[in-house]
Image (cartoon, grey):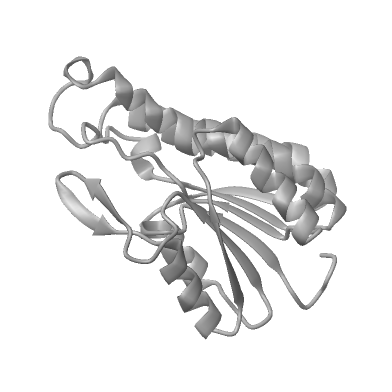
């Protein structure tokens, strides 16, 4: 790492759920944690499976700051490749290093957990592949050179045992299996640079 005592960490999907928990839970004094997601302003809500869920980067950053770390809210649509490159440029310019990259973002589609076969679900469910698989690859691709240069240590992708069993249908399973294999193959390429790549199954 460029600064041995201070880590720069990027967590995607940090406005709610697993990403929010990771960003808040790993914060320690001196860290800078860049929290990336779509919902930034306090009081923001999203509709999910017919429920209204509060979702805010600003709230995540408040919790991080209270722990003595520095939270940075960065609003991004990970479906947009240009915005991914903009985030990479921002980190390079503002911090000049990246020690940990944690991919926690996912696309939730209302059809995902419906108890019906795949051919009765919307083809728009493919968006699950774009955020959480394609976006993880594009963001890793953009930021790995910085991690190598600044002696970063870890890339994490959040997966699920749905990679190995039936869960929510073939799109979900393919995305999780893809995440696992991508993390494995990234680890192979990163080994000479002393950077670990791994996939974690939630729960």
At which x and y percent is residue 18?
A: 40, 58
Nearer to us in this view, 94 or 191: 94
Residue 86 locus on image (x, y percent): 67, 42
The extreme top residue here reads 119
Q: Quadrant of residue 97?
A: bottom right
Depth check: 164 or 67 in front?
Answer: 67
**In the image, residue 140 above or below residue 25:** above
Q: Is residue 6 above or below residue 142?
A: below
Residue at image location 47% in from the left, 38% down from the top: 132
Left or right of 186: which side holds 25? Answer: left
Q: Quadrant of residue 43?
A: bottom left
Q: Which one is in front, 94 or 110?
A: 94
The image shows residue 79 at horizontal and vertical percentages of 49, 33
Q: How many numbered circles are shown?
A: 0
Quadrant for the N terminus, please.
bottom right
Q: Quadrant of the C terminus?
A: bottom left
Decide if residue 192 is in sight here: yes
Give how far across and how far down residue 41 sits, in percent: 41, 62
Identity of the residue drawn at 38% across and 39% down: 107
Q: At 81% from the left edge and 58% from the top edge, which residue is drawn?
A: 96
Left or right relative to 49: residue 138: right
Decide if residue 184 is in sight here: no
In the picture, measured across the screen, residue 174 lies left or right of residue 109, that is: right
Residue name at image x 39 percent, y 54 percent:
202
Q: Is residue 77 above or below residue 26?
A: above
- Indicate the quadrant where residue 166 lies: top left
């Amino acid at each position: 790492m460029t600064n041995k005592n201070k880590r720069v960490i990027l967590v995607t999907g940090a406005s709610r759920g697993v990403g929010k928990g990771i960003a808040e839970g790993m914060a320690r004094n001196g860290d800078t944690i860049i929290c990336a997601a779509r919902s930034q302003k306090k009081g923001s809500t999203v509709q999910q499976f017919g429920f209204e869920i509060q979702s805010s980067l600003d709230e995540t950053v408040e919790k991080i700051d209270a722990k003595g770390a520095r939270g940075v809210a960065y609003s991004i649509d990970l479906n947009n490749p240009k915005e991914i490159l903009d985030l990479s440029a921002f980190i390079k310019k503002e911090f000049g290093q990246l020690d940990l990259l944690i991919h926690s973002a996912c696309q939730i589609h209302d059809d995902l957990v419906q108890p019906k076969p795949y051919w009765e679900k919307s083809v728009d469910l493919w968006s699950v592949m774009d955020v959480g698989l394609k976006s993880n690859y594009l963001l890793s691709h953009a930021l790995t050179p910085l991690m190598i240069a600044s002696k970063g240590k870890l890339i994490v992708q959040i997966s699920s045992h749905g990679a190995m069993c039936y869960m929510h249908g073939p799109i979900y399973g393919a995305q999780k299996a893809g995440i696992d294999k991508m993390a494995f193959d990234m680890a192979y390429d990163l080994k000479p640079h002393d950077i670990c790549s791994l996939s974690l199954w939630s729960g």
